[in-house]
């Protein structure tokens, strides 16, 4: 029987050892032909990137990023740094909050490493309920006592995204209340960029730190880069912390990732990202049709590369489902740890997350294993150990 994990990442590490892995949300799917051509040009990219000054390499990468993100307001913007991973960016953000003695209102539910990284830095944290944020907007945020508001947009795992009016209302609230707005945009390329978030941020004068990433989107063997973009008022303080930890990210890494960004811009996000995710989601939803798993009501419009599922009878909860499929060498991510402020509430223990961007053959085999296992479970095919789960 599987014991409750200490964190979501602990389960993701377990998944790396499984035959079929639906746990981690990193991009491991197959390269498209145009992306394979990038890999065939590695020697040229190495030569060209090694000839660049670091800031020139960073600027070229930044330009490719904001063009794909349709954030034209960032043209000629200089307040940014690049970290090796989004977790590094969050940790720097946490160090800045701790140094300033600031608390944070963090979205709930969301991936637990945001909470854990801030907590490790000694930041006081309070939950910002996702459902209330969308239902009541800035009126709800007035109830948050924290010095900063930390939102994940789109949110992992539900795929919930702030609309133009919702985003603007949050920004206006932070300006009026004198709060810093913290943003995790690491899943941004899975949804259509209907508006330029940075234009709103910069024109409002709000104090902000925004985190971007590539690791969830492109299959680059976990080679990734995380932008931190921030307002002028926090620039010097944030850059001091950054420079205590990092000198720079490899020019070669930025050169490769820049090619992936340009390729997606040329082909369009629909062909480069969204189409494949949509096809994978359709296969996954067919696999769980008429089974104990259903798409969670908060995630029916999810466009991210993960699916948020509710667990039903005969499974007792998320760990029960995870244990059942782990015996079939398939790792699912139990949902309770996304509810970092209320992990032990039984209501929050009825979800699992499934990741979609695995190599296609692996994904199909895992989906078939999932479907077969759900069929067995529906027919009551639990062994004695599983029947006694949780007793």
Image: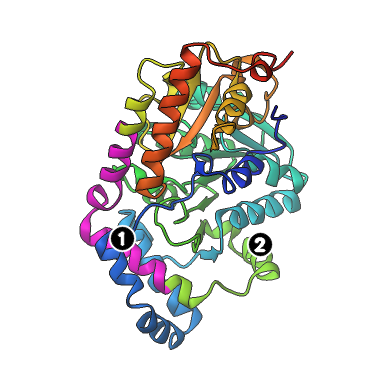
| Residue 384, numbered circle | none
Label 1 neighbour load within 10 Å: few <14, some 14-19, many 20+? some
In this rendered view, identify the residue nearer to me: 370 or 124.
370
Identify the magenta region: 255-282
> Where residue 302 appears, x then y in whole percent?
37, 31
Q: Tell me which colouring the rendered structure shows.
A: rainbow
Q: Secondary structure at mark 2?
A: helix
- Give how far apart the Cα atoms at labels 2 and 1 are: 27 Å
Q: Is residue 18 left or right of residue 122?
A: left
Residue drawn at point x = 74 percent, y = 42 percent: 119
Determine contact: label 2, label 1, CB under 8 Å.
Answer: no
Q: Identify whether 258 is placed above or below 283.
A: below
Earlier in the chain: of badge 2 and badge 1, it is: 1
Q: Identify whether 115 is placed above or below 286.
A: below
Count of labels in the image: 2
In this rendered view, identify the residue nearer to me: 131 or 139.
131
Q: Nearer the viewer, mark 2 or mark 1?
A: 1
| Residue 237, numbered circle | 2
> Where residue 188 appears, x then y in whole percent?
40, 46
The quadrant of the picture occupied by the N terminus is: top right
The residue pinned by badge 1 equals: 67
> Where residue 344 appears, x then y in whole percent?
70, 21
> Where residue 359 appears, x then y in whole percent?
39, 50
């Amino acid at each position: 029987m599987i014991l409750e994990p200490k964190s979501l990442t602990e389960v993701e590490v377990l998944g790396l050892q499984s035959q079929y892995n639906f746990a981690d949300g990193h991009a491991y799917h197959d390269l498209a032909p145009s992306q394979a051509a990038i890999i065939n040009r590695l020697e040229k990219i190495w030569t060209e990137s090694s000839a660049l000054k670091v800031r020139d390499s960073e600027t070229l990468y930044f330009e490719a990023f904001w063009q794909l993100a349709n954030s034209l307001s960032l043209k000629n913007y200089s307040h940014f740094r690049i970290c090796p991973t989004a977790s590094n960016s969050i940790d720097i953000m946490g160090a800045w909050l701790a140094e300033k003695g600031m608390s944070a209102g963090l979205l709930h539910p969301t991936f637990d490493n945001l909470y854990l990284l801030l907590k490790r830095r000694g930041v006081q944290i309070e939950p910002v309920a996702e459902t209330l944020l969308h239902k009541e907007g800035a009126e709800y945020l007035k109830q948050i006592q924290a010095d900063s508001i930390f939102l994940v947009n789109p949110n992992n795992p539900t795929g919930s995204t702030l609309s133009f009016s919702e985003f603007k209302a949050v920004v206006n609230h932070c300006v009026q209340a004198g709060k810093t707005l913290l943003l995790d945009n690491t899943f941004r390329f899975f949804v259509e960029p209907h508006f330029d978030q940075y234009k709103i941020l910069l024109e409002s004068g709000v104090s902000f730190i925004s985190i971007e990433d590539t690791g969830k989107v492109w299959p680059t063997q976990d080679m990734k880069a995380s932008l931190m973009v921030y307002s002028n008022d926090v620039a010097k303080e944030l850059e001091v912390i950054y420079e205590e930890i990092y000198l720079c990210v490899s020019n070669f890494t930025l050169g490769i990732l820049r090619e992936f960004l340009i390729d997606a811009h040329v082909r369009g996000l629909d062909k480069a990202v969204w189409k494949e995710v949509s096809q994978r989601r359709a296969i996954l939803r067919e696999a769980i049709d008429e089974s104990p798993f259903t798409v969670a009501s908060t995630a029916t419009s999810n466009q991210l590369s993960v699916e948020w599922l509710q667990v039903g009878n005969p499974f007792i909860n998320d760990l029960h489902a995870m244990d059942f499929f782990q015996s079939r060498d398939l790792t699912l991510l139990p949902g309770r740890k996304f509810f970092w402020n209320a992990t032990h509430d039984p209501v929050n223990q009825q979800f699992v997350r499934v990741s979609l961007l695995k190599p296609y053959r692996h994904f199909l085999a895992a989906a078939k294993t999932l479907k077969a296992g759900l069929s067995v479970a529906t027919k009551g095919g639990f062994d004695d150990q599983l029947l006694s789960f949780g007793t």
